[in-house]
Amino acid sequence: MSNASEETPAAPTDPAALLPLFERAFNNRDLDQLERLYEPDALLILAPGTVLTGDERRSRSREEQHFLPIKVAVRHQYVTGDIALVINDYVHEGTGPDGTPLRIEGTAVDVLRRGADGAWRCVISNPAGLGTAGPTAP
């Protein structure tokens, strides 16, 4: 029996494959696989003016991961050379820590880059996109 990380490529060779890998790793709570989908110096934009990178990004991602199941759908993808801009809609839906139903949805904007190994990884992750993502009533 193998684990999900052994069955899943560390990072995709097609930018369109990154979000399905992200969704699978997130829903499986596979933090190591999630990290392999990001470049080491990737930026995580929590809100306008709140940008994390490096160890701070990695620590914050692990500490604040609510792990409500996620569904991700690519809205638009634009690729030029080794850079891709991916605009995607996401929905987290499940039970919050206090037992009440919780739904978080938004439109994220992510920038991916193809590395020397041919794999695409996220260099900028902006879950709130240009809007304000947050909890809503189910």
Image (spheres, rainbow, N blue to C red):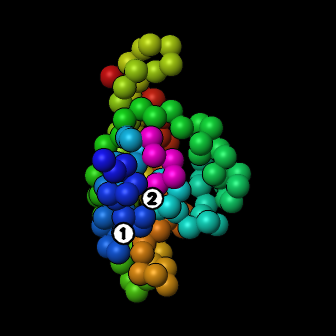
In front here: 134 or 15?
Answer: 15
Question: Is 23 contained in the magenta span?
Answer: no
Specify the quadrant of the image occupied by residue 65.
top right
Q: Position of residue 35 (x, y in %)?
A: 53, 56
Query: What residue is at 36 percent from the left and 69 percent from the top?
Result: 12
Q: Which residue is mark 1?
A: 12
Say which of marks 2 and 1 sits in front: 1
Q: Tell me the amino acid under the disc marked 2.
A: Val
Specify the quadrant of the image occupied by residue 7.
bottom left
Query: What residue is at 56 percent from the left and 67 percent from the top?
Result: 39
Query: What residue is at 37 percent from the left and 25 percent from the top?
Result: 94
Say left or right for 120 vs 14: right
Q: Which residue is mark 2?
A: 109
Q: Position of residue 42 (x, y in %)?
A: 60, 64
Q: Position of residue 15 (x, y in %)?
A: 35, 70
Identify the magenta region.
Answer: 29-33
Say left or right for 46 vs 91: right
